[in-house]
Image (spheres, grey):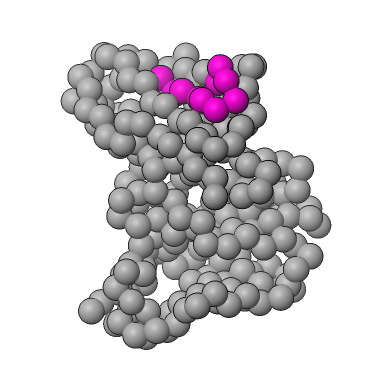
């Protein structure tokens, strides 16, 4: 089946620094990827839709300058949390659409900002 | 706009009991897809089932079964003879045909007591 690899799985960073999270489709090409954020004991909230070769589309209330998304190839999308603060601590999950398998999710990244 | 409601926030059952997780959805579209995902403590989302709006046939996969009823806009999930490994958060989700954005319910945390 389709596999989406997400790295790192856990990251701890200092307040004010930036963190990059990678999402790769391993055995298929993904023109569209999605980034979600999940707070403890809550549902997944869509942050943005990442389109290969074009700017990401952000959901209402998501700061595009803080959460930079780059989808430079058909197999890689990155989310950079810039100038991270403790309130950005969360679980971030990416997903990609494949023709045969529908939505495939990465394993998630647990970000802790100290 | 679409909406998915999972009214049961948390459920606990004793091992080997049957348990049903409820999902009620709202959409104006006539063509849509419904999903169930399992999120174990490790965080990754595990795909369980996809059902399109034209297929109301109930489905059984091992101990899992799904009941799709358009008349009540429900897509309920039953686990028969529950096991401790079934402990997880379960999400119901909806996407309208032609729209790639998944709408998730708030999730049901299922705990199987040994």
Q: Can you say whether A20 is above or below B90 in the image? A: above
Give left or right: position of A7 versus A15. right
Location of residue B84 by image quarter: bottom left
The structure residue drawn at horizontal position 38% and vertical position 40%, both measured from the top left corner, is: A108
Residue A78 horizontal/vertical position (percent): 46, 23
The structure residue drawn at horizontal position 81% and vertical position 57%, both measured from the top left corner, is: B30
Identify the main secondary structure in magenta: strand
Q: Can you say whether A42 is above or below A59 in the image? A: below
Q: Is residue A25 visible?
A: yes
Q: Is residue B4 visible?
A: no
Residue B50 horizontal/vertical position (percent): 62, 60
Residue B77 horizontal/vertical position (percent): 53, 72
Give left or right: position of B114 versus B52. left
Is A73 contained in the magenta span?
Answer: yes
Give left or right: position of B61 versus A89. right
**For the magenta stretch, what is the residue range?**
A71-80
Residue B110 horizontal/vertical position (percent): 36, 68
Q: Can you say whether A107 is above or below B69 in the image? A: above
**Of the pair B94 and A107, the residue shown nearer to us:** A107
The structure residue drawn at horizontal position 63% and vertical position 54%, both measured from the top left corner, is: B94
The structure residue drawn at horizontal position 57% and vertical position 32%, both measured from the top left corner, is: A33
């Amino acid at each position: 089946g389709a596999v989406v690899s997400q790295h790192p799985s856990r990251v701890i960073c200092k307040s004010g620094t930036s963190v990059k999270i990678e999402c790769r489709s391993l055995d298929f090409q993904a023109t569209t990827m999605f980034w979600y954020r999940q707070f403890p004991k809550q549902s997944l909230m869509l942050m943005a839709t990442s389109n290969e070769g074009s700017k990401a589309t952000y959901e209402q209330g998501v700061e595009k300058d803080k959460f930079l998304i780059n989808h430079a190839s058909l197999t890689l999308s990155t989310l950079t949390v810039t100038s991270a603060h403790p309130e950005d601590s969360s679980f971030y999950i990416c997903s990609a659409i494949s023709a045969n398998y529908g939505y495939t999710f990465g394993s998630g990244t647990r970000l802790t900002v100290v | 706009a679409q909406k998915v409601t999972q009214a049961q926030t948390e459920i606990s059952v004793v091992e080997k009991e049957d348990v049903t997780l409820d999902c009620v959805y709202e959409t104006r579209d006539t063509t849509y897809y419904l999903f169930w995902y399992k999120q174990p403590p490790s965080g990754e989302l595990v795909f369980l089932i996809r059902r399109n709006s034209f297929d109301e046939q109930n489905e059984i996969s091992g101990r899992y079964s799904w009941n799709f009823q358009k008349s009540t806009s429900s897509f309920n999930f039953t686990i028969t003879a529950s096991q401790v490994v079934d402990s997880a958060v379960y999400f119901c989700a909806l996407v309208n045909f032609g729209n790639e954005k998944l709408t998730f319910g708030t999730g049901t945390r299922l705990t199987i007591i040994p």
